[in-house]
Image (cartoon, rainbow, N blue to C red):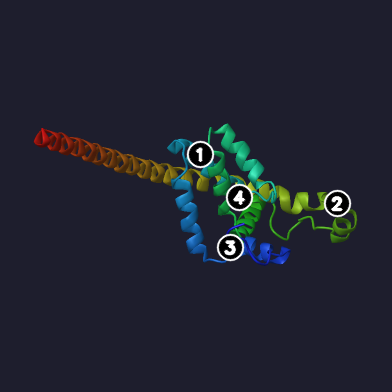
Amino acid sequence: MLFRRRKPEGFFDRMRTALWPRRSFGRSFQYFIKRVLRLTATPHAIAAGVAAGVFASWTPLLGFHFVLAFALSYALAGNMMAAAIGTGFGNPISFPFIWALTLKIGNLLIGIETGVHQKHVDLQALLRHLDVSQLWDPVLKPMLIGAIPPGIITAVGFYILTYWGVRVFQTRRKSRLAARAKARIREIAAARADRKSDGAKRA
């Protein structure tokens, strides 16, 4: 196969690439923007898909962000590819900030002060018996509740920015395509006129 690696990537290489891209995060961000702008869908569908992916990234449901993003995108008549791209909002740089903020907001909304009457995680039960319920009250529940306010705010913000950007990009692209079509028509008309003039001269 052309451009195939001589040495296939190992598990650790794939994990490192997933956590930290070979290129800079700035170039990866530009790549995501171009992918979003070039999607074939209406501005609303693309913007709704991105917003769904961004909202899903605020939840602590790691491994289910794509599923949640697709479900929200379907409910909002959004684009599924845009939803997948939108989940890129959750990344190794943003996750620590997201988790800390959602846990703090969730505890405030529930009315729990950090460190005061707060249920602690039983690591022995969690690791030995895989008792995930040990994480529900002290971690997952407040993070899920705390993800709603910032998730909605950022999703609405990304929807507005994406809708505007896609609309401007698609309008300019249609103008460029129309200009090229008109130039092509003029070239064809000029070529036909030249052929007719040549035929008249020969006659």
Residue at label 2?
131
- The image position of residue 159, as x and y in percent, is 47, 43
Please state if 114 lies on the left or on the right of 72 as rendered: right
Could you give the CA–CA distance between mark 1 and mark 2, rounded to whole angstroms?
Answer: 36 Å
The numbered mark at residue 57 is 4
The numbered mark at residue 93 is 3
Q: Say what amino acid the circle numbered 1 marks.
A: Ala
Q: Say what amino acid the circle numbered 4 marks.
A: Ser
Q: Quarter-wise, where is residue 183 in the image?
A: top left
Q: Are marks 2 and 4 in contact (CB under 8 Å)?
A: no
- The image position of residue 140, as x and y in percent, is 72, 50
Q: Are marks 3 and 1 in contact (CB under 8 Å)?
A: no
For image coordinates 61% across by 42% down, the residue present is 69
User: Along the polypeptide, which appears first: circle 2 or circle 4?
Assistant: 4
Q: Is residue 99 above or below residue 188?
A: below
User: Along the polypeptide, which appears first: circle 3 or circle 2?
Assistant: 3
Q: Say what amino acid the circle numbered 3 marks.
A: Ile
Please state if 15 lies on the left or on the right of 169 as rendered: right
The numbered mark at residue 150 is none
Which element type, helix, strand or loop, lies under badge 4?
Answer: helix
Residue at label 1?
48
From this viewpoint, is residue 111 visible?
no
